[in-house]
Image (cartoon, rainbow, N blue to C red):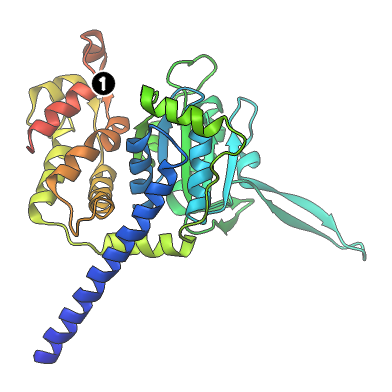
Amino acid sequence: MQTKNKTSKTQKSKELKDIENLNKNISNVREHVKEIIFGQDEVVDKIIISLLSGGHMLLVGLPGLAKTRLVRSLGTIMGLTRKRIQFTPDLMPTDILGTEILDESSKGKRSFRFIEGPVFSQFLLADEINRASPRTQSALLQAMQEQRVTVAGTNYNLPKPFHVLATQNPIEQEGTYTLPEAQLDRFLMQINITYPDKDAEKQMLIATTGIKDNEPKKIISSNNLIQAQNLIRSIPVGEKVIEAILNIVRNARPDTSSLKIIKNSLAWGPGPRASQALMTASRARAVLNGRLSPSVDDVINLAEPILKHRMNLNYSAKADGITLNNLIKELIKTIK
């Protein structure tokens, strides 16, 4: 019995040390990113939380807000291979996944050879994803969920870890295709990026218009990130936090909500994937902020980016000027 208790204490001590080391490494990543990307601290934190959670991100913001620079910097800092796809109406699924070509050997023997597309990377920037046709958008569905693609009946595994950061322009909607609900649900978070404040923009002007610009350097490796993702999932979550997650997600569904405004305003709400996302992301946020377990405050902070793209207003609510942000604020009140 004593040996078992001793082993348990040793294991717990090791886990605590691993979490402390993870927090130190992630803090270094966070600080280095903020030396390169100015005035977007909240956005940087949420992207790091998404990466620690093993999820994909949908970044909504106007052009020129350093989205591409952010992906390039994070990819370098975290030791991830990165590629970029500019989505356009004429983009085809094979432009993303890859294709088979017919090869002929010196002896005249013919065989098919698969050429990998840009999806075969660890950190993929899908720029203006809603500009491609639904058929092309759907090419990412299997990759995002299963981390593999199927071409000509053959499965090809993607590199690990695999993360997609997709961007959308919230203003210009002409010539775009709305992302289907099934694809939106595969994004862990929808992160809104806005203009930096005056002080941050001043700092950016000084830092980026000189002879030498800050360049990102590698802080951790992709293997370190995989280990961090596994460690995040082992962090215990208290019953109070679990109940808060269940309450907020179930109240966001018109069929099961106890809130009249939700029943009257939503066409549909988030599925179980939202609960899973809140659980994992709350753990990651706790570690990012130097804590050993998540709290209800983590759930409250992450509710909007995790739930917003998984909810849809009905026509009546839109006519009355109700917004999803208003509804999420009402949901948060139920767990405070």
Instruction: Looking at the picture, tell me which residue is in the foreground, 78 or 229.
Output: 78
The residue indicated by pointer 1 is 313
Q: Quadrant of residue 188?
A: top left
Q: Nearer the viewer, residue 264 or 129?
A: 129
Residue 334 picture quarter: top left
Residue depicted at x 55% and y 45%: 215
Q: Residue at x 55, y 51 (%)?
A: 149
Q: Residue furthest top?
A: 319
- Is residue 79 at least partly visible in the picture? yes
Query: Which x, y percent locates residue 32?
Result: 43, 48
Could you say which is closer to the camera, residue 265 or residue 168? 168
At label 1, which amino acid type do we have?
A: Leu
Q: Is residue 229 left or right of residue 17?
A: right
Residue 119 in the image, given as x and y percentages of width and height: 57, 47
Which quarter of the figure is the N terminus placed in? bottom left
Q: What's the residue at 24%, 18% (across, down)?
A: 323
Q: Position of residue 167 (x, y in %)?
A: 47, 32
User: Which residue is farthest right?
Assistant: 107
Q: Is residue 183 above or below residue 285?
A: above
Using residue 151 as the reference point, say whether residue 50 is left or right of it: left
State left or right for residue 33 relative to residue 273. Answer: right
Q: Is residue 138 visible?
A: no
Q: How many marks?
A: 1
- Name the secondary structure under disc 1: strand
Q: Nearer the viewer, residue 190 or 61?
A: 61
How packed mark 1 is, by other alpha carbons closer than 10 Å (few <14, some 14-19, many 20 or more), is some
x and y percentages locating residue 3 in the rendered image: 14, 91
Residue at image point 27% right, 29% down = 311
